[in-house]
Image (cartoon, helix red, strand yellow):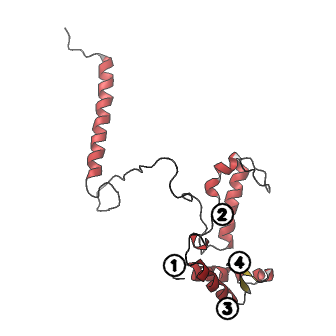
Amino acid sequence: MSSFTDPGRRGVTGPVLTVVAAGTTLVLLASCGDGGKGTRDEGVASIATPSTTTGKTADPDAGHVRIRLDDNQQDIKRHWDAWTGCLHEHGVPAGRRPVADSPALKTCELTYPLQPVELDPARNPRYGDGVRTMVRCMNGHGIKSVVSDGNWGLAGGESMNLPDFDRYRVECQVKSFGDSG
């Protein structure tokens, strides 16, 4: 008989061996160096270990756009415009609120701008101190501010029209709620 191999068997054996060889190579590369963490940079390529979790992460805010303490009003407006633009692109008419079960809300969920973590009383144990520091700082710049219901606020809306309001708000916010607060 001929030494001809059945094409069906050869067709399965080749890909299986390729997958096994590739898998073995990945295991060997992952086991070298830093344990597969992919964080050490010594000029040698390494493979990052994939996440073992599936679905949503433990942090419900993961992946969301987050406003920063040092964002000015233009930056904040840009974040909100991106969210409302996404809603509009997915069928929500401009100027309208999406309904609670709207597919556009789900699609645009990650573009919804979240406030800085430092401004969340539940996540910042020094929030109360930051509020008092913020009020002192704003008042020091001539912007009448008060503590109201555990938060800071303006004594009147006219302060927002002062020429350097946004600059002082950002400066005081970073000073009051930032790491060195």
Q: Quadrant of residue 75?
A: bottom right
Label placed on residue 162: none
Decide: marks 4, 1 in contact (CB < 8 A)?
no
Q: Secondary structure at mark 1?
A: loop
Instruction: Tell me which amino acid carries mark 4.
Output: Asp
Circle nearer the viewer, 2 or 3: 3
Q: Rounded to the nearest whole Å, what is the CA distance between mark 4 and mark 1?
A: 24 Å
Q: Which residue is mark 3?
A: 140
Q: Is residue 52 above or below residue 82?
A: above
Q: Which residue is mark 1?
A: 179
User: Relative to residue 18, is residue 93 drawn left or right?
Assistant: right
Q: Secondary structure at mark 2?
A: helix
Circle nearer the viewer, 4 or 2: 4
Q: Rounded to the nearest whole Å, what is the CA distance between mark 2 and mark 1?
A: 23 Å
Q: Quadrant of residue 145?
A: bottom right
Image location of residue 33, percent across then percent down: 26, 57
Q: Which residue is mark 4?
A: 149
Image location of residue 140, percent across then percent down: 67, 91
Q: Is residue 167 above or below residue 46?
A: below
Circle nearer the viewer, 2 or 1: 1
Q: Quadrant of residue 6?
A: top left
What residue is shown at x 65% (from left), y 89% (from top)?
A: 136
Image location of residue 95, percent across then percent down: 80, 57
Q: Nearer the viewer, residue 179 or 14?
A: 179
Q: Give the position of the N terminus as an image quadrant.
A: top left
What residue is shown at x 65% (from left), y 74% (from top)?
A: 72
Decide: marks 2, 3 in contact (CB < 8 A)?
no
Image location of residue 68, percent across then percent down: 59, 70
Instruction: Tell me which amino acid carries mark 3.
Output: Gly
Label placed on residue 79: 2
Lower sequence index among marks 2 and 1 = 2
What residue is shown at x 67% (from left), y 65% (from top)?
A: 78
